[in-house]
Image (cartoon, rainbow, N blue to C red):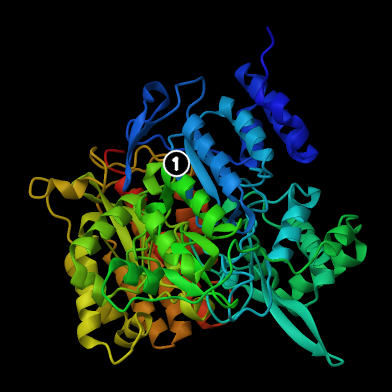
Amino acid sequence: MSTTTWKDQLSDSIPDQIKHNIENFESQIQLKKQNKVEDKVFAETRLRLGLYGQRYDNGFRYDGFKKQEIAFPSGTITKGPETKWDAPGMVRIKLPKGDVTPDQIEVITQLSEEYSDGVNHITTRQDIQLHYLHVEDTPDLMYRLGAVDITTQDACGNSVRNITTHPSSGVHKDEVFNVDPYADILFKFLLGHPDTIEFGRKFKIALSGYEHEACALTNMHDMGLIAKEEKVDGKTIRGFKFVIGGGLGAVPHDAATLYEFLTPDKLLPVTQAICRVFSRLGEKQNRALARIKFLVAKQGVEKFKILVEDELKTMPIDPRCEPLLAELTEYLDSPKKEGTGLINPKDNSDYSAWLNNNITEQKQDGYYLVTISVPLGDLSPEQMRAIADIGRTHSSDSIRFSIEQNVVLRWVSGSDLKDVYNALSTVGLAAAEAGTISDITACPGTDTCKLGTSSSRGLAYALRKHFIANPELKKSIEFLKIKISGCYNSCGQHHLSDIGFYGVNRKKNGKDVPHFQVVLGGRWSESIGSYGLPIAAIPSKNVPSMIESIAQKYQSEKSTDESFPDFINRIGKAKTREVIEPFMKIPEFEESPEFYFDWGDTRQYTTGDKGVGECAGEIVSLFDFDLNASERVYFEGQISLDDDNFAQAREKATEAMKFAALGLVKVQDKDASTSMNDITEEFKKRYVSTNIFAEKFAQYFFDANNEQSDTIETARRSLQEAHLFIEEVIRCRDEAAGVK
């Protein structure tokens, strides 16, 4: 008896390109099972199809994988696939603009129940991730997604990642024009494009309908497009301010302006030329320097523009450009009902609070955007289906996931808002928290990410509970933003928030203690007006108390209507650190053992199960040396930055790295020379060439004396680099115990 497969059932409804990729992957799986394909080849294939390996924390390992219970506000579900030949991993489902229909939501939900653990996780790039699935199941999953016009292609790996816009595109009152159609043709053009195959790292694109607010965060992207209009011969012409080379990661870079005004007919060719330049000249060996922001910084934006213009003159024009440009139309998704005005009750009800926090007027009269606050970005199957039903009845077929890990309904008539609220209430999604301090962004951290150092999701959950239990605290700082990353890589966008955190490790008497670096000074407004800088590392369990303390100082000393970033800037780093210092102390294990356990984890904390990304090798340690000098000088550099003394800030950053490197060299040679040249050579010989010290951080030290202009950008970047270098020195020192 023959068995009908998902491929047999759905093959005719899947685009040829997607189907071809899935078929190739099925073949790769069979070869992998027979050990006929190298791991690195298989890894590259699966990454380009959105499949990551993941960290198998909390007992979920290949040899002990069990079904798990997931708690949601609406109840507890028990889900989880059976153990198969491969260790479980994660699939990222690519959703351009975060745009998804009710029918697509239902398919994704079915897949999460059948193949995953039932959790539908919204990412900070408007994707959906499913965890704890097995490679053998993924071709069927991909066929089922392809049948509803969804792909996982290029969702991971060295590729063009999901193209993002703001969920309000097309309906925002202040937008210049709707950028959604341009995002759509860029997605179609770049998906699997041959000129993107040889990227050294990932490439991220965002489009914004207006410039002066954060919107789609174009300034922190590899490539950003901001809607503009100009008058030419009396006619209004559309175009884009075209920026390049932005990014967060370990050291944030502001994007540089490549074109002040680029007309839409040049959008695809220019993008193709950029991809070709990046493929040819971008770093390939050192992954830490392989993003396009480093290429743009190295070449300078004017020289980079010449490279792009030269490429345009010689490259073959893709024949798809003209047909795709012809597709550009001014479209909008359609409402289900006639728009009516908002009736806002004048009371203190939960519904009234929800209207005030979660509802935004569209530019179309009578219609509203509804932001659904989703704790940790996690949706249960019941919640996903409820959102799909609300979309069909009260909204439109364009439901959006946001970069803040929430859901946005569009085109809701004012008369339907109470019904929408009631429907959301039944599945625990009617909290009036959108845009408040409880609406915390957090990356997966140690839950599933191999690089996670501390539990970002655990901290986010703990903080949300803390704010709920302390309403006066929440009210005092209600509209501040908190963003949390599990490590320095900024997947949780910690540089952009009022209060940011990223995970680091410290030791006390040889025991690991989970910590978070406190990052202050970020400015979400003004199209990301500034990036935050790390102030100090504190034990993870001290974070809620530290926030209370800094909130009290803000409330008692701020001037009228003074924003939190302005307040932090006014009082300066030194006084801010005074508030934080009491929370830096690590108690003895016997005194407070809870400090040695991360949020939400029943095991004693360790970084020993981190995956690829850690440095290899061991370090010989003769004594436990003191890094106070380097950290002191680093902090002095921050004060210099506050005083607009950019040259001195850069000098302090270099000096701080010198002290840290000297201390590490002295671990192996207590009589080491203190001259800069000798320190550099000894450090390189003893730690970098032996792969003990991470090369990407070492490069910050080696490049520190290169000639640079003394600007706020270079000074801030130098301090960021110095901070990361010192953190790596501390890591090496802590791992040196017992090595002779």
Using the image, determine if residue 380 lies above or below residue 262.
above
Q: Which residue is denoted by mark 1 in the rendering?
A: 381
Number of other residues with Cα within 10 Å of mark 1, as a class: few under 14, some 14 to 19, many 20 or more? many
Q: Quadrant of the N terminus?
A: top right
Using the image, determine if residue 375 lies above or below residue 473.
above
Residue 387 seen in the figure? yes
Task: Locate residue 372, reporting x and y percent.
Answer: 43, 60
Q: Is residue 508 left or right of residue 559?
A: left
Task: Locate residue 680, reporting x and y percent.
Answer: 48, 60
Q: Is residue 14 left or right of residue 457?
A: right
Q: Is residue 131 left or right of residue 211?
A: left
Q: Residue furthest top?
A: 1
Task: Locate residue 245, reporting x and y percent.
Answer: 64, 68
Which residue occupies 65% across, 57% down? 203
Task: Locate residue 595, reporting x and y percent.
Answer: 18, 50
346 or 359: nearer the viewer:
346
Which residue occupies 30% across, 53% down? 461
115 or 190: nearer the viewer:
115
Using the image, determine if residue 263 lies above or below residue 68.
below
Using the image, determine if residue 294 lies above or below residue 615.
below
Q: Residue furthest left?
A: 591
587 or 152: nearer the viewer:
152
Q: Which image quadrant for residue 637? A: bottom left
Residue 702 seen in the figure? no
Q: Which image quadrant for residue 10? A: top right
Q: Of helix, strand and loop, which one carries label 1? A: helix
Which residue occupies 8% across, 45% down? 590
Which residue occupies 35% across, 55% down? 425
Q: Quadrant of the C terminus?
A: top left
